[in-house]
Amino acid sequence: MYKNFNVTEEERKQIMEMHQSYGYKKPLDEQVKEIPKPTTSKFAPPQISNEPEVYKPEPEPEGDEAVELNAFNAKILALKNAGKMSPYQFMLQYNKANPSRPIKTANDKIVPYDTKGATSSTPAPLDEGAPEPVRGEAQIFGVLAFAEGKTKPFRYNGRPITQSNINEIVNNLVEFLTKTGTIDTLRTFRNSPRFRIPQFIELHVGTSHSGSGETNAAVAQGRFNFLTGIVMEAFKKIGVDASVAKSVVVNKTDNEYAPSNLDRNFYDPKLVKPSATERLAWIKVTSLETEGNTMGGLMAIQKGLNQSSSIVNSLFVDGVDETKILQYLSKLKTFSDVEELDRLINSGGTRFDSLEEFLNDQLFDDPEQMRAAAVILQRCAMKSELQKDTVRLFKVGGNLNISIGMGQ
């Protein structure tokens, strides 16, 4: 056994003592001519260790290695999204390349392992980007006129109304909701734990001054009910479940009531003729769109920012390509994109901890380009219906501040 090693007699003695501690009385005989068959049954229970499992993450890649890893992740994610790779195949490829942050498949969705011992500082696993529901273009569907005290209209766009006019409004709503992608966006994000669907339906109803405040309020509610019925009919025609449609209409509709603005403290309502223009109603719908980059797109932006940056950046020598930095920033569409890009930068591959730090370091000597970067990011914030000052540019020092964590 020891013919290939040069050991002293003392070392040989120590080895023999180790053998004896495990129950052996003599050195192992390696000249085995036949491998003995196992004697345990194939149904024997597996040996279970009493040692607790401890999660030991692999070191995170840095520098060029991290950039290459991100590019590989983006490539296999694109294949999965295109249907050329199953979620299971994607999981195998990803886990092989990313041992420190494994994933698994659950109902064909990629989710992180519940890894024991992992802390909050452990990088989050790869997801599929940050598309979110945002509002697009708005359209008004006809103007309905009501007689005094009535809850059903008698005119449509200035002409006597017929049932065919109501059907026309319903059909126009159906066409708008389907062709603009609003229905698809609703279906995608209706139960999203992260993104809130913005209100996109507005019902406007008005009343004149001929009745009391209580009477006019009741009439207004009747007119709201009429408009709601039209919207519900459109969802029904599309094929949306009635309970889902009711939930959408109730939770995503903004009812705007405009009572008469007659100054009752100055005018006598009985002496002033009611105005027909105060008894108008309409349905206004704003399209819902799914905006945002995929993870592959965000990784490409990160890579572009890396290539456009430079360690050599001073008032005298500037190796930064500010124009390209702005070009890559302009590819961001929503504030969720901004937050995901920030997370990517923080997870490795650059010498910066955040997008804010990156921009303040690379654009500090060019106030005009810094202002342009702020405008791009502010536009993303407002697209996600956040305040413009979610991204602020300080006058003193000219530094940029990005309030990460303010997204949906």
Image (cartoon, rainbow, N blue to C red):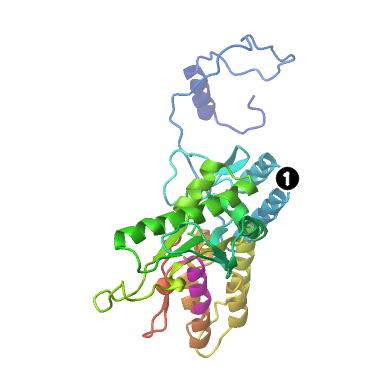
Please name the residue shown 45% across and 67% down the image: 279
Q: Point out the residue furthest to the bottom here.
A: 316
Q: Is residue 308 above or below residue 105?
A: below
Q: Position of residue 251 (x, y in %)?
A: 45, 52
The one nearer the camera, 243 or 319, is: 243
The one nearer the camera, 221 or 38, is: 221
Secondary-structure class at tag 1? loop
Q: Position of residue 195 (x, y in %)?
A: 49, 54
Q: Is residue 97 above or below residue 370?
A: above
The one nearer the camera, 257 or 279, is: 279
The answer to whether residue 148 is left or right of residue 287 is left
Q: Main secondary structure of the magenta part?
A: helix
Residue type at mark 1?
Met
Please name the residue shown 35% across and 69% down the image: 209
Number of marks in the rendered image: 1
Q: Is residue 380 magenta?
A: yes
Q: Position of residue 348 (x, y in %)?
A: 53, 60
Q: Position of residue 63 (x, y in %)?
A: 58, 63
Q: Point out the residue furthest to the left here.
A: 265
Q: Is residue 139 magenta?
A: no
Neighbour tally class for label 1: few under 14, some 14-19, many 20 plus, Cα within 10 Å: some
Give the labeled residue for mark 1. 85
The answer to whether residue 42 is left or right of residue 208 is right
Residue 286 visible in rendering: yes
Q: Which residues are magenta?
A: 375-385
Residue 123 visible in rendering: no
Looking at the figure, which quarter contains the N terminus? top right
